[in-house]
Image: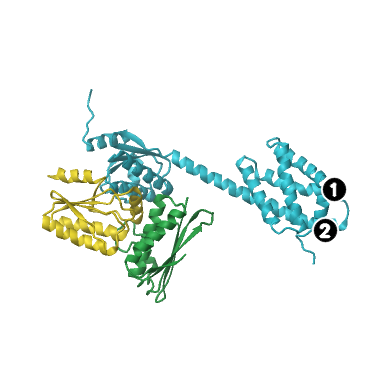
Chain colours: A cyan, B yellow, C green
């Protein structure tokens, strides 16, 4: 039985015609990447991959298959980070088949091995698609985290009074971050009052209300007070209709009201100069 | 078994928890506090958990119990110094320690107690 | 990874200490460490009080997405949990401090699996991954 993965004649053929094959391959890849990668860099990449393919195909080296997939994964990840499309990346792999097919001639044994070879290359091309997708996922997750950090500033309103203006939806990940930043700032500054402003939070449902309550509770456990401001009429209606009890949580309509409130709680008063 | 020391500052008892408490240490502390509140006619109790890294439901219940018990004896309990990570974990657990007053540190707790009179 | 016995209440503190070491070693953030240690404390106490004692095994592992973290397997040979749904009822809003052990612990971890059978004991597996 012929082993599909070992194509000795193909390996010989590739080695014998290495320079020409890589030249042709390089041409196709360069026209696909359109000048975004230098010719010498592409050449280097292709030579490495070519070498590994030969090793896999000749069957001499068991570790070569794993190495080849790893090299392609890294290449694909790098392309993903640099803004290439997954098709551009995969074409780079698929086009080695064209280069070989052009030169192969009519030898029947080579044609048979070529078919097995072609299947192997298709598999590798798909592998680059998958690793590309995984790399893009990672980028998106990292960006989401960075965005979350940026959109949760803790502001010092006055001595002993800090505020977090929330803009956008309040999900559990955001709540965790808000709690962490608020509590850490309270400890670091010794402030005893915090204001959580939800003017920029579009909707308040039961879940969001629970997140708000959690935050207020956590601040209270530390020995500080948390006031929620920015309760718009629609939000007030929603809260009442949902039957959510805000109990003895201080709430104010505007940030200004909350500031006046926390100032008076701190024993301060604002008056004319 | 380790016993948590109870200090006295005027009419206030101060307990500073430094170690990861075994269950029997927790129970002993409750007993000792009850005794001391009565013996010293204390009007305030400060429980300082600045050094405590983990508060689970068992310890949480102890804290609530101490607050309730002290109130029965006419003393106010203030829990001070809770760490942010502990507070976040407790609210997630659903333990809000109702009836337990809090302050950011022992100094503020004492001022709070003094302010009552 | 050894089996930690949960036979007496002092064992619960030991479980917390071992979980802490593993959590720190896997690079969990301080808040995540606190959550997994607290969850472990709740489940270990449950195994002791309702399960008649048992054991815990801590494994350093990784999430399906490859994030490092820890997994802890608690087993006891107790009477089992008769009404699992009741035990896991989200008591967050009622939070009166009773029976919060399992449902509370579930909110603190990334993975939670409970297998129990009347008369055949209980197995709880929890995991926390770094973010």
Q: Is residue B86 left or right of residue A147?
A: left
> Real-space Cα distance between discs 1 and 2?
15 Å
Q: Residue furthest bottom?
A: C119
Q: Residue at x 36, y 58 (%)?
A: C38
Q: Are marks 1 and 2 on the same chain?
A: yes
Q: Is residue C80 left or right of residue B43?
A: right
Q: Secondary structure at mark 1?
A: helix
Q: Secondary structure at mark 2?
A: helix
- Residue that label 1 marks: A103
For disc 2, the neighbor class at 10 Å (few under 14, some 14 to 19, many from 20) is: some
Q: Residue at x 11, y 54 (%)?
A: B41
In the rendering, at what x and y percent does residue A44 appear?
A: 72, 42
Is the C terminus of chain A in the top left, top right, bottom left or bottom right quadrant? top left
Mark 2 — on which chain does it sit?
A: A
Q: Is residue B79 above or below residue A253?
A: below
In the rendering, at what x and y percent does residue C13 appear?
A: 34, 62
Q: Depth check: give the residue in front, C61 or A103.
A: C61
- Residue that label 2 marks: A112
Q: Residue at x 65, y 51 (%)?
A: A70
Q: Residue at x 28, y 48 (%)?
A: B81
In the rendering, at what x and y percent does residue C91 appear?
A: 34, 59
């Amino acid at each position: 039985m012929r082993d599909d993965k070992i194509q000795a004649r193909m390996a010989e053929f590739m080695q014998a015609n290495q320079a020409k094959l890589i030249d042709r391959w390089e041409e196709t890849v360069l026209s696909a990447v359109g000048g975004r990668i230098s010719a010498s860099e592409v050449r280097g990449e292709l030579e490495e991959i070519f070498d590994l393919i030969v090793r896999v195909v000749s069957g001499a080296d068991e570790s070569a298959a794993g190495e080849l997939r790893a090299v392609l994964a890294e290449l694909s990840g790098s392309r993903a980070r640099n803004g290439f499309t997954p098709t551009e990346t995969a074409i780079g792999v698929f086009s080695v088949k064209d280069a070989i097919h052009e030169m192969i001639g009519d030898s029947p044994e080579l044609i048979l091995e070529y078919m097995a070879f072609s299947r192997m290359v298709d598999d590798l091309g798909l592998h680059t698609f998958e690793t590309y997708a995984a790399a893009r996922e990672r980028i998106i997750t990292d960006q989401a985290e960075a965005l979350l950090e940026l959109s949760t500033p803790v502001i010092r309103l006055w001595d002993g009074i800090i505020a977090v203006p929330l803009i956008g939806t309040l999900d559990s990940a955001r709540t965790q971050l808000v709690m962490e930043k608020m509590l850490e700032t309270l400890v670091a500054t010794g402030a005893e009052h915090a204001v959580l402003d939800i003017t920029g939070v579009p909707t308040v449902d039961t879940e969001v209300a629970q997140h708000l309550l959690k935050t207020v509770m956590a601040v209270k456990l530390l020995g500080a007070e948390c006031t929620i401001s920015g309760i718009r009429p629609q939000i007030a209606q929603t809260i009442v209709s949902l039957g959510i009890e805000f109990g003895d949580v201080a709430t104010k309509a505007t940030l200004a009201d909350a500031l006046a409130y926390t100032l008076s709680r701190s024993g301060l008063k604002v008056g004319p100069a | 078994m380790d016993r948590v020391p109870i200090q006295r500052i005027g009419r206030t008892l101060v307990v500073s928890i430094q170690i990861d408490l075994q269950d029997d240490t927790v129970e002993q502390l409750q007993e000792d506090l009850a005794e001391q509140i009565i013996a010293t006619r204390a009007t305030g109790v400060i429980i300082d958990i600045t050094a405590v890294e983990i508060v689970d439901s068992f310890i949480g219940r102890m804290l609530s119990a101490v607050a309730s018990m002290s109130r029965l004896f006419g003393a106010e309990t203030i829990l001070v110094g809770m760490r942010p990570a502990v507070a976040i974990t407790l609210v997630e657990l659903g333990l809000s320690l109702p009836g337990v007053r809090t302050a950011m540190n022992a100094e503020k707790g004492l001022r709070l107690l003094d302010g009552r009179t | 990874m050894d089996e930690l016995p949960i036979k007496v209440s002092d064992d619960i503190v030991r479980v917390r200490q071992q979980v802490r070491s593993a959590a720190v070693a896997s690079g969990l953030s301080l808040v995540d460490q606190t959550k997994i240690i607290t969850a472990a404390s709740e489940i270990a106490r449950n195994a002791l009080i309702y399960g008649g004692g048992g054991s815990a095994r801590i494994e350093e592992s990784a999430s399906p997405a490859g994030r490092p973290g820890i997994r802890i397997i608690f087993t006891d040979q107790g009477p089992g949990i008769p009404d699992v749904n009741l035990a896991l009822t989200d008591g967050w809003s009622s939070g009166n401090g009773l029976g919060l052990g399992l449902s509370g612990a579930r909110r603190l971890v990334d993975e939670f699996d409970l297998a129990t059978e009347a008369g055949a004991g209980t197995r709880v597996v929890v995991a926390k991954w770094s973010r």
